[in-house]
Image (tube, rainbow, N blue to C red):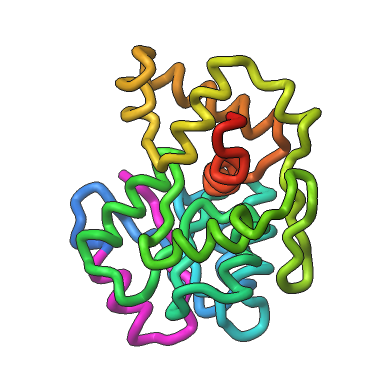
Amino acid sequence: MIRVIVAEDQWAVRSGLVMILDASPDIEVVAEAADGDEAVAAARRLRPDVVLMDVRMPRKDGISATRELTADGVDVLILTTFDLDEYVFGALRAGAAGFLLKNIEAEDLIAAVRVVARGEGMIAPAVTRRLIREFAGAGRPPGRSAAVGEASWTAPGPAAIAQLTPREREVLGCVGEGLSNQQIARRLGITETTAKTHVSRILAKLDLRSRVQAAIVAQELGDAV
């Protein structure tokens, strides 16, 4: 079972999300939270596989909560009504594993939770192009901070990229294309476990907090990967 916490301050929206997720035979909602403080406390107590997190909430917002949870090794899937704004950028820098819009279809929400629970990234198609353009397409060289909001995320510089093996560069390129570990394995003729190991090593070498950040780095580097 995939154990999920749903953090959303609007009761009606939260109830709807819980109903959708609980209807899936392989997903169990183990707790609900109305703000970031409740989400962090519940996650530390229950150690879920995924926290589905709203961004605008009272007391502690979803970005601050995401920063704390990812530091604890918890995967966070951001759910927002905004197709792209400073909250999404903040969530990216905080290490969120994925981004969804609240108008997502029920089956797509369930699929996204499963993807993140497998340790992979998920970005709603509506935000992908603008996200990549802001962080990777503005002519900013690797190593320069993308400063949006209160904190900045610094892309790895050439010295960090040079640490990657040729195979890791191939895997990074695949991550940039949005391929899953299974798809990477098929393309490169390796096992899914080996693909997952390569991704973990890439994140460690480049000091990245999520697969989504790795995908943006790959997009920025382009043919240099």
Q: From the image, which quarter does the C terminus lie in?
A: top right
Name the spot of residue 37 as percent of width and height, x first: 64, 72
Name the spot of residue 190 as percent of width and height, x first: 38, 13
Residue 12 vertical placement versus 45 (above, below): below
Residue 114 vertical placement versus 82 (above, below): above
| Observer-nearest of 8 and 180 | 180
**Would you identify the image quadrant in which residue 66 lies?**
bottom right
| Residue found at x 41% / y 42% | 178
The count of marks equals 0
Name the spot of residue 174 as percent of width and height, x first: 44, 32
Compared across the picture, whether 194 is left or right of 55 comes to left
**Would you identify the image quadrant in which residue 104 lies?**
bottom left
Residue range highlighted in magenta: 1-20
Compared across the picture, whether 135 is left or right of 140 comes to left
Name the spot of residue 118 as percent of width and height, x first: 40, 39
| Residue found at x 45% / y 22% | 195
In reply to whether residue 85 is colored magenta, the answer given is no
In reply to whether residue 17 is colored magenta, the answer given is yes
Residue 163 vertical placement versus 60 (above, below): above
**Would you identify the image quadrant in which residue 87 lies?**
bottom right
Compared across the picture, whether 61 is left or right of 180 comes to right
| Observer-nearest of 33 and 181 | 181
